[in-house]
Image (cartoon, grey):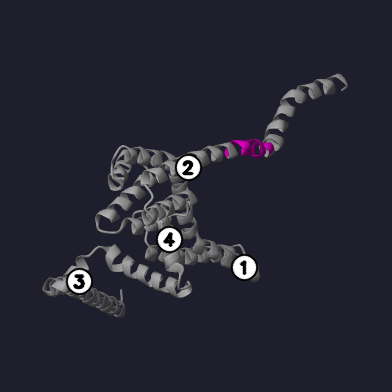
Amino acid sequence: MSSTLILLLGGLLLFSAFALTLSVIGVATAERRAVGRSLAAVQAIDQAPDILREELERPFSERVIAPLGEKLVGIGRKLTRADTADRIRHKLDIAGNPQGWDVNRIIGLKVLGMGVFGLLTFLYMLGNGSAFSKTVLITVGVGALGYLLPNILVHNAGQKRESLMLNALPDALDLLTISVEAGLGFDAAVARVAKNTTGPLAQEFARLLQEMQIGVGRMEAMRSMGERTSIKDLKSFCLSMVQADQLGIPIARVLRVQSSEMRTKRRQRAEEAAQKVPVKILFPLIFFILPCLFIVVIGPVILQARGAFG
């Protein structure tokens, strides 16, 4: 081996050793710096003021999700009309004010639903290679559906609740009438109805009793009860009680008339629903039941005739 090759090989080995030494030193220095930065951050958190420490210890939902929800509510209030909050509050009253549902949350969910549904639809249409005009049209339609979805859910909950209230109203008025005729005062009769019955109507009577107990007048409490619902029979009952209180008519007589009228209306609603059954069953009978019956009855005859004349 020549001396030149030996010198080149030695220089290469020295350069490699020098580079390896520098890399090891650099890695160690970077690790020490990273550890130093982490220790400094921990010390800064420990030495931070109590307000900052409390802020960092708060849950993620309170630090991030809540401010985001407030921004969505602000955007929603700018997009909606001035009376939207009052209408949503009235719908929530009809739905019984479910736990966790309030006006701000509904408005925020409307904006969130519009954005999420619209964005997902837009991306899906772009992925399918649809035309731009069709993509925009479908995106706007689905976004509008997402915007209206919270209203639909609240309206559906209100309808279900009012259906239960309407069916339970005659029995509640019968109990209220018997209690008043037995000598109880109106407040005590309402308390008995709220205690001995269940469902959304019992909750409304319990709220009526609470309002009267905290100092609200009977007429004002009855008016508020009528405003919290869209049931005509319940509104009529509240209006009758207000008029009886204003004119001095005995409450027992008014309750007797109202309970009898409510029972009559419930029987009429049942008869009306029974009369609608033949009409409702007509289309399933024609399009689903009769074709299956024809197949079962006439099908074997057709197969036998085909085999005989085949």
Residue type at mark 4? His
Residue plotted at (35% across, 45% down): 202
First reached walking from the N terminus: tag 1 or tag 2 = 1
Q: Position of residue 80 (x, y in %)?
A: 47, 71
User: Which residue, given by chain and number where applicable, does mark 4 sit on?
Assistant: 90
Label 4 or label 3, whichever lies nearer to me, is 4
**SS for dot 2:** helix
Q: Secondary structure at mark 3?
A: helix
* Residue sitting at x 44%, y 71%: 76
Pick whichever of labels 4 and 3 is earlier in the sequence: 3
Q: Which residue is mark 3?
A: 31
Q: Nearer the viewer, mark 2 or mark 3?
A: 2
Residue at point 55%, 39% (across, down): 268
Contact between labelled residues 4 and 2, with CB atoms less than 8 Å apart = no
Task: Relative to 284, say whether 243 is above or below.
Answer: below
| Magenta part of the chain | 273-282
CA neighbours of label 1 inside 10 A, class few (<14), some (14 to 19), many (20+) = few
Q: Closer to the camera, 282 or 119?
A: 282
**Residue 244: percent from the left, percent from the top?**
39, 52
| Cα gap from disc 2 to disc 4, whole angstroms | 25 Å
> Which is nearer the eye, 175 or 106?
175
Q: CA distance from mark 1 to mark 4?
A: 32 Å
Residue linked to disc 1: 137
- Do labels 3 and 1 touch, CB within 8 Å? no
Which residue bears the numbered disc 2?
262
Rendered location of residue 1, percent (x, y): 30, 73
Disc nearest the viewer among 1 and 4? 4
